[in-house]
Image: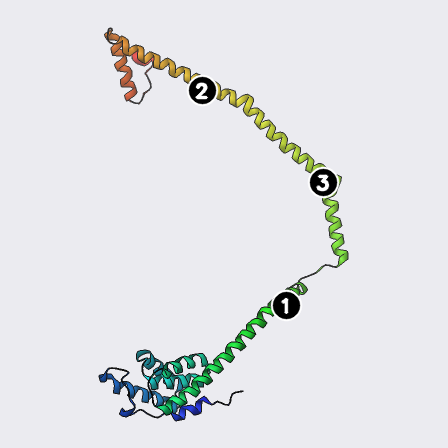
Amino acid sequence: MSLFNWKLRIDYFRPLTQADLSFFAPPGELYRVAASYNAALDLYVSGQEAQALAALAQICQDYPLFPQANHLYGVLLGATGKFAEAADYLGRAHLLEMESAEKQQLEQELKEAQREAAAIQRENAKINRRERALAPVKKQIALESILQKAPSLDQDSSDSIQQQASLIFDSPEEKRKTALTLFISLGIAVLVLLIFFFYWRPQILAGQALELERIEKLTWLEEELHQRAVDYPEVGKILEDYQAWLSEGRPPRPSQAEKTR
């Protein structure tokens, strides 16, 4: 177990003065950002840790080259047990310019954060391997538990049910019923096919033949009327009436009695 105390490391931090500032921001913003840093440090010291962490996170996001902010935020993250994130921010701060004393302190904290993060990663990997190894066993235990809770039949009851089912489906009476059903279904199918081929199909073919013959006769008659209309005006008049009847939608012709009225 590590004897490194992250909360005690926070005691090394002091409010920043003008002499502590480097050019991590435009000159007009340096003092304002430094004041925000000092306010976040005061929040943490007064016990308002969540507010201090939120303020420092925003400062580090807006001014990533602010060494003291990255350093303090990394230490506060280490104090909460977030060692991977702590190592990230401490590593950023280590790349920036700062005093030698603070740099030495930072190096110790960075090594500890990396060590703790690696230990947690190894432990998580070990847990994951254990979970993967136990997964089939847990699955088997759960399956056995479900089967135990489900209602079960003893061997005699199971054999009895199987025997009854065998008697029902293998009895001569059941076999005769099954065969009779199949025979009736097959007979109906054959009967429908016979009716179609020997009754409906000939009628359909005969109707088609009559329709073709009627069309041929009508075609011959129309052609003949067109040819004779040139020499016989009466035929031409009949042809005109015929075409007018077609154009009117072929209305029904009046009977002889209706004509004489």
Q: Are marks 3 and 1 in contact (CB under 8 Å)?
A: no
Above-or-below relation of 92 to 242: below
Determine the residue positioned at 27% across, 15% down: 241
- Image x and y of residue 33, in percent: 28, 85
The disc labelled 1 sits on which kind of residue? Val
Determine the residue positioned at 28% across, 10% down: 227
- Image x and y of residue 84, in percent: 45, 79
| Circle on res. 54 | none
First in sequence: mark 2 or mark 1? 1
For numbered disc 1, what is the local secondary structure? helix
Q: Residue furthest left?
A: 28
Count how many numbered circles sit on residues in the image.
Answer: 3
For numbered disc 3, what is the local secondary structure? helix
- Image x and y of residue 252, in percent: 33, 19
Residue holding disc 1: 137
Instruction: Report, in whole angstroms, how far the alpha carbon at label 3 lies from the one at label 1.
Output: 47 Å
First in sequence: mark 2 or mark 3? 3
Determine the residue positioned at 72% across, 48% down: 165
In front: label 2 or label 1:
1
Residue holding disc 3: 174
In which quadrant of the rendered view does residue 186 lie?
Answer: top right
Instruction: Report, in whole angstroms, how far the alpha carbon at label 2 lies from the one at label 3.
Output: 49 Å
Q: Is residue 106 left or right of residue 136?
A: left
Q: Are marks 2 and 1 in contact (CB under 8 Å)?
A: no
